[in-house]
Amino acid sequence: MSLIFGRRTSSGLLPSHSRRNNEKNDKFFFITKVAAVFVVSAVAIFYFVAKPTYTETSDVSIDIVDFGATAQVQPGNSKADSALAFDKDEEILNSIEDETINQVNDLVAADTPKPEPLEGMKYGAVRLPSGRAVNFVGSVCVGRAELAYVFDTEVEAAHMKDCCFGNAGTKHCTAVEIGLCQSMQTKIRQYASKPGRDIQFWTKKEVEQKKLRVLPGLTLWANTVTDNEQIGHLINKDLLFFNLHNDVEHMPKIDYFVFPKMAAPQGPHAVQFTETILGEMWEKNTFWGDQIQRKKDFPDHMVCFERAVEGEVLHDETVFDNMAQGDQFRQFAVENLGAKHFGEGCPPLDAVVLRRTEGTGLRSILNYDVIDRVFKRNGINSYKNVTVAGADDTTAHVNVFSNFGLMVASHSSQLKNLIFSAKNSIVIETKGTEVGYMDPSPFQEGVDEPLGIIYKVSNGHKPDYTSCPEDHGCTKLKKYKVDYWLDEEVFEADLLKVLEIRRERCGEL
Ligand SMILES: *[C@@H]1O[C@H](CO)[C@@H](O)[C@H](O)[C@H]1NC(C)=O
């Protein structure tokens, strides 16, 4: 099974299982510890943080994982589906019948001689100490609407199909592949669910015949759910790159950055932010969905990667995994993006209301008098209306987001710009959705603890259904794009909660 999940050599079962039941089959089982051996100097770390350039970096060497390692990955604090899959490995494995094990081994044994492992890295999945799980995959080709996994042999392709589509589900995976199967399954279904998109399993020979461009080395495969410029998704992916790259102790150098779907950014903030984060990668080694289709070098509008790393599938809204990453980004943003140098204290309680002026649904608050009254009752005597737009540059975004102590905002991807906000600033995201809906919010994840922002989702306000038709995505359940009337009691209760947290951290108003 050379491609998605690793080498045929690791086709054996989970170490614990093999030890328990199958001593004699040990030659099938590669038990390799998650050994990451790195030599990175403090100078290299400084270099990474200080300069937005990534190509001449360290002499990081990596010997990350063999498949057998997935089960040994420490359970972290991540909520990712892939992470959950790892945690379940043992349980699933214990339920595998010996008969199935033998079938799998027969299948593998029937396979052609094993290919040489790629230098320096084997496929698999690993959870970084930050808690983030990353999947390493091999030989994937992507176009804007297509995704193909490349296999050396028919047997491998059959094995993969069985693994991800078979009735028995993951039972037919070799044990070590389970974690990845479950997470890749999400992605595969997502592609396959659209009409006209059959998942393709190609052989290496076909790739050669089609003369597809294969990017050597390691590609960060930034799969987005959108193909339009959407600042929130873009910031998520840029920061995934930033974090993985700066986590030099644990990551190999990333050679290419590929957005298979999203077109190259156009808006000034999107361009400036991405360009600054990617440094020289931007020029040479970054490919966007629209370029993949247009570039002369890609005759069949596909690009293939020799090896790829992808972040978690479901929880890629998390911008920072921990405070160290948050601090590292703040330092970078101050030096390169004109962000403010915030101290450790608390910002003044200057209140703002963020209003959308463009995009899908303005999500307007229909009764600002509630804000006036509730604020006044709680010692906040004035507020300012603020806004940012796609035509604004990074400086404009930074200005809005680094100059408040309390922000009231509708659900909006602009809130990803909270990465520029001060520690202990308050954000209340008000929505006309049911209590508990999208709580935590995607804009809260990774800015709350890592950046020290006090974030409160305030659901339960009264939606104006006429403001957003169903064909605009506003179903009865999913109505965060509607205009809404603030519920005075709910809003005040939520304000009191965040003010209390602020009081604990910062003292009296
Ligand atoms: C903010 O904008 C709303 C909607 O236009 C308006 O009703 C309100 O008076 C404005 N508040 C301030 C302080 O300008």
Image (cartoon, grey):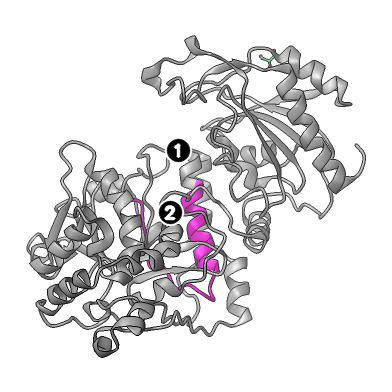
Residue at screen point 59% across, 38% down: 415
Span shown in magenta: 235-259
Disc sitting over residue 81 in the figure: 2
Q: Which numbered mark, 1 or 2, is in the foreground of this view? A: 2
Q: Amino acid at mark 2?
A: Asp
Q: CA distance from mark 1 to mark 2?
A: 24 Å
Residue at screen point 81% across, 16% down: 373
Q: Which residue, as the protein is rendered here, is positioned at the far top? A: 466
Q: Nearer the viewer, residue 453 or 328?
A: 453
Q: Nearer the viewer, residue 253 or 369?
A: 369
Q: Quadrant of the C terminus?
A: top right
Say above or below: 392 vs 39.
above
Q: Nearer the viewer, residue 229 or 158?
A: 158
Answer yes or no: disc 1 within 8 Å of ligand 1: no
| Residue where numbered disc 1 is placed | 230
Q: Nearer the viewer, residue 388 or 350?
A: 350
Q: Is residue 308 visible?
A: no
Res. 258 image quadrant: bottom left
Q: Secondary structure at mark 2?
A: helix
